[in-house]
Image (cartoon, rainbow, N blue to C red):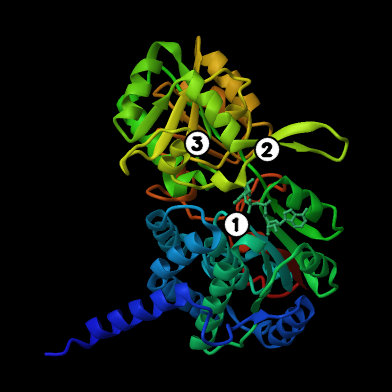
Amino acid sequence: MIDEKQISEIVRKVMSDMDIHSKPARKQLGVFDTMEEAIDACNRAYETFRYYNKEQRENIIKEIRKLTHAEAETMAKLAVEDTKMGNVYHKILKHHLVADKTPGTEDLETKALSGDRGLTLIEMAPYGIIGAITPSTNPSCTVICNSIGMLAGGNAVVFNPHPHAKRISAYAVDLVNRAVLAAGGPENIVVTVENPTMETSNIMVNHPSIKMLVATGGPGVVKMLLSSGKKAIGAGAGNPPVVVDDTADIEKAAKDIIDGCTFDNNLPCIAEKECFAMSSIADKLIDGMQKNGAYFINSQQTAELEKVVLVDTTDKQGRTKKVINKDYVGRDAKKILAQIGITVGDDIRCVICETEFSHPFVQTELMMPILPIVRCNNFEEAMEMAVKAEHGNRHTAHLHSKNVDHMTAYAKAVCTTIFVKNAPSYAGIGFNSEGHTTFTIAGPTGEGITSARSFTRQRRCVLVDSLSII
Ligand code: NAD
């Protein structure tokens, strides 16, 4: 007997595989040749969408969640193909996480103040059309996560994605438009351009129709948006340290750290980037990491690797400094090790080494599955180094410890938006943990783990001497 469900699943899979390797057969929805055209279309669509109530917005969000689940694998493959970074399996998990745990309209709360002088309502209203800049590291996840939160808040969105992730970002914009249409909504409340550039970004940022800006990326883009003169949310770079003290369950800490550090090949901004371990447990920790897919390289191999993954660049003042070699960002540990003549199997997912605190692997946000480990004499020294290595980004920090005094002291000292204890870093965005998810963690501007409410503005409605019914 023909199983229709099975056949349609096969057709979907074949279609999705075809999509990956060929140019889209049809014009993608919401994807325009120029930024001006994209913003014009969005403006027109917003005239309808701005009158949508929460139920109508929620129906759209339901469809976005459904399509994101259905096309998670397609997007994961396309993201890796488009950006040459990351891990397909982990990207599939990230898409399901976005679909399941990005808050919708339930995140919007009305406040009512009633008393002798009447009733005052405070409601969370849309900004209008938001201009959003998205990174290459989580391209479709950020587009979908931002779309859910921004549409839930009643806004429309114009995306200027990272040029190195333009195909997968356009795919995600098309998916959101397909979901909107399936829910009976207007096309183009989420738009982008086929070829995003700095020029299209400038047009978007300065366009009078764009009422709010949201940047997810490194320090350059956050600085640019914050100097735009518009309301802006900045989700910037991190360099999350992980501290391990002598009260921790060391075997679990070793596994958790490697699991977190290697998730999507270390692309997430929250992933463990350097480890500060108390000397008394450092050997056991390194041993545990090696049992969990880490390959330890000695100091000579570390020096060789440094020449591969970091390159010299000259800044505007003529000073030379080391920056990451983008060819190795988000690449497999196996490929990175091969560059220094080490051949390993697929079971190796992380490169670990021992370094000094000042080593560039500690100080630089590599976004590669390379974890430098610094031995520390005591907890206080580990904490002090971790705070310095975080560079005041106010982003993310991790700790493995059973000592609540250590937890409290470190949390107070490091001042990060996310602080994870005794779990892999991804617990910080609701993966196998409590709490909602986001792919836009706004440390610099303080919205934190952004959600629909972050993309709204308060409006007050006052009625005097009536409708207080007591
Ligand atoms: P990136 O900074 O190179 O690019 C991010 C986006 O900004 C891209 O769309 C890019 O085209 C644009 N851009 C960069 N500089 C710009 C400028 N001066 N003017 C206008 N646009 C500019 O980042 P990436 O390599 O794609 O992503 C990695 C970085 O993003 C890391 O530093 C990571 O920590 C950070 N990140 C932060 C979060 C967060 O939620 N805080 C999430 C993901 C990534």
The amino acid marked with disc number 3 is Glu
On screen, residue 62 above or below 250? below
Q: Is residue 395 visible?
A: yes
Give the residue at the far left of this rendering.
1
Is residue 285 left or right of 319 when viewed as pictured?
left
Q: Is residue 102 visible?
A: no
> Image quadrant of residue 321?
top right
The answer for how far apart the CA atoms under marks 2 and 3 are is 19 Å
Mark seen at residue 323: 2
The answer for how far apart the CA atoms under marks 1 and 2 are is 17 Å
Q: Residue at x 37, y 36 (%)?
A: 343
Mark 2 or mark 3, earlier in chain: 3
Circle nearer the viewer, 1 or 3: 1
- Residue 181 in the image: x percent, y percent? 53, 87
On screen, residue 244 above or below 229? above
Give the residue at the far front of this rendering.
341
The amino acid marked with disc number 1 is Ser
Is residue 178 left or right of 122 when viewed as pictured?
left
On whether ligand 1 comes within 8 Å of the CB at mark 2, the answer is no
